[in-house]
Image (spheres, helix red, strand yellow):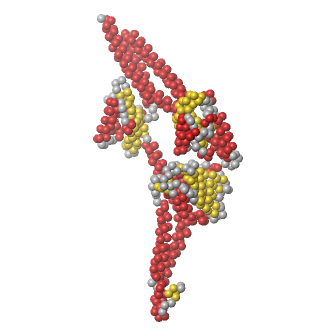
Amino acid sequence: MLFFKNFLSGFHLSARLVIPVILTLILFAVSFFSIIIPAIENIVMDRKREMIHELTNSAWNVLAQLENKVIPGKYTRKDAQEDAVSILKQMRYGKDDKDYFWITDSWPTFVMHPYRNDIIGVALDDISDSNIASVLSQINEVVEYKSEGFLDYEWQWMDNPLNVVPKTSFVKKFDPWDWTIGTGVYIDDVLVEVNQIKRKFKIIAFIISFFISCLLLIILLQHNSEELKRISAEKALQDSEEKFRSIVEQSAEGFSLCDEEGKIIEWNKRAEINTGLKKSEVLGRYAWDVHDDIFCEEDSKEILSTRLLIEKILKSGKIDDTTKIQEHMLNDDDGTSKIIQELIFPIKTLKGFLMCCISRDITNIKLAEENALRQQKQLIRADKMASLSILVSGVAHEINNPNHFIMGNIGLLENIFNSIKPILHKYYEENGDFRVAGLNYSEIYHDIPEMFSETLAGSQRIKHIVQELRDFARQQPDDLIESVDFNAVVKSASTLVSNMIKKSSDNYSVKYGTNLPIIQGNFQRLEHVIINLLQNACQALPNSSKGIFLTTSYNKKTDCIVCKLKDEGIGMDENVLKHITDPFFTTKRESGNTGLGLSISSNIINEHNGKLHFVSSPGIGTTVTITFPVKNKITS
């Protein structure tokens, strides 16, 4: 009997001690492997991506330095390109110094690859290896839209062409040479580093588990010391919980956890900051009730929908992508509002599913996006008005003043004619018909009032035309859906600033390209760019003997429309040139220039997927080249 009593006592003691510890270890393991380990993997991968990003920028700078020697004529571009290939081909880094850089162009073909001389200069259609062809296409696609970016693909292991493994790379385009530079890391190398970290953590976890197992074994063997063993087990459990809470509390995101019934069991400090509710106010309450208190849902359907969603997650452990991330408006006591974004997901346990909610305050992000959009529109409007001030002043000087004289004199002349009309008519009745300005008086007697009226109407029409020019300042929609003839854009812009051009230069010419495709875009915004560039060119001329030359063309090879504007003005040095498209940068501040024109023009060209390129030399002049691909051309 005593044996059975001891056995049953030991069994109940073991169950009472072991089960809570096992549950705690499971919760710790789930949190550890589902949150911490993935986070470590992401950190390591992000670090590698940042490394290849910086390395590619360093290699890109080598090309930029060589190009800087080409611009002043110290170097030919061909020599610079040969030196660039030689330098980058020798650059190595990483384990065993076998990681390398490579270069492609926009055809696309490989210009340089340290380990694959057989594919250098080979066109895409002539490459037999479909994987290499796919990589070239991916590279071209990335740099075509963003100029730089990451891509994932499979490539040979270093200098071993028989071993093809996954790889991630960063590529960046060097526009002056139409080259793309890239380098990458092998995913297997990253996984090796991640596995080393995992291994260390697993050793620590194994040591902790081994310690707890030994402790439990001692408790089971020495069941007569039941109270001492219970205290030791509680302490071990408390330590584990404190580790978990420490991880949660230090999180930069709001963290809450619901048990299988939907009651909140965890609520960290960041959740308190995001919601304004203390941990003591929410623990033990149902999640949908707390959600109602936080976001003040007045619609009973919304409250019911929240409850049904939480109950569904806890029951099935599944969640739709449409409801996984939610955004809610939260009104603080001080009358301000903020936007809270929630990411909810289930955590599987032995008893069922828990629901985890990670929240963050995205109010500033939303405000920043709205402010950026609003400021961009305001800048466009401000620059347009600045351009209009120049146009309107010219029109007012050249048209309005003489037109006012015409309108004033017409009335005076009409009154003079009405005053002498009886005298003329009396003379006509007494002496018969007579000649006036080569015409018979009887023929023009009834026409003269009509002439006055028509002349006044023409003068008013001139006034109306000037008013329509002022209406150019009205805000237009930003949709790029119009059918645009680029030659028509240039013609319209040249007409609008013709007065300024005549005053600034005696040598202005425009050469329109033939067979330019009709494209989709915004006529007025493209016109705005040409106006701004023409105004800058006029202002740059030292005297009227210097010329301005404008050309348009279509490059079938690159499928691009090209517009070049060259002036023989004062030019710019390198320090000015590198800041020319920065907002509010100007060298003519004292004359009232805002410094917004070229910045906004650059943004407009970027919206049309184009590029704005400047080449300038002090005392010689400036050439502005606009290119944008005709990807959205309309078939006639």
215 left or right of 403 in image: left
Vertical position of residue 45 compared to residue 511: above or below? above
Residue 161: tell me if it is visible: yes
Total marks shown come to 0
Residue 483 vs residue 550, the one in the foreground = 483
Residue 184 x, y percent position in the rendering: 57, 34
Q: Which residue does the image show at 53% across and 61% down from the upper left?
A: 492
Residue 105 x, y percent position in the rendering: 59, 42
Residue 416 vs residue 588, the one in the foreground = 416
Vertical position of residue 438 compared to residue 1: above or below? below
476 left or right of 124 in image: left
Residue 140 x, y percent position in the rendering: 55, 42
607 left or right of 352 in image: right
Q: Which residue does the image show at 62% across and 51% down from the upper left?
A: 577
Q: Which residue does the image show at 40% across and 10% down from the upper left?
A: 221
Residue 584: tell me if it is visible: no
Q: Which residue does the image show at 33% across and 11% down from the upper left?
A: 9
Residue sticking out furthest to the left: 300
Q: In which quarter of the image is residue 491?
A: bottom right
Vertical position of residue 63 compared to residue 555: above or below? above
Q: Quadrant of the N terminus?
A: top left
Residue 52 vs residue 576, the one in the foreground = 52
Residue 65 x, y percent position in the rendering: 65, 43
Vertical position of residue 580 compared to residue 109: above or below? below
Residue sticking out furthest to the bottom: 430
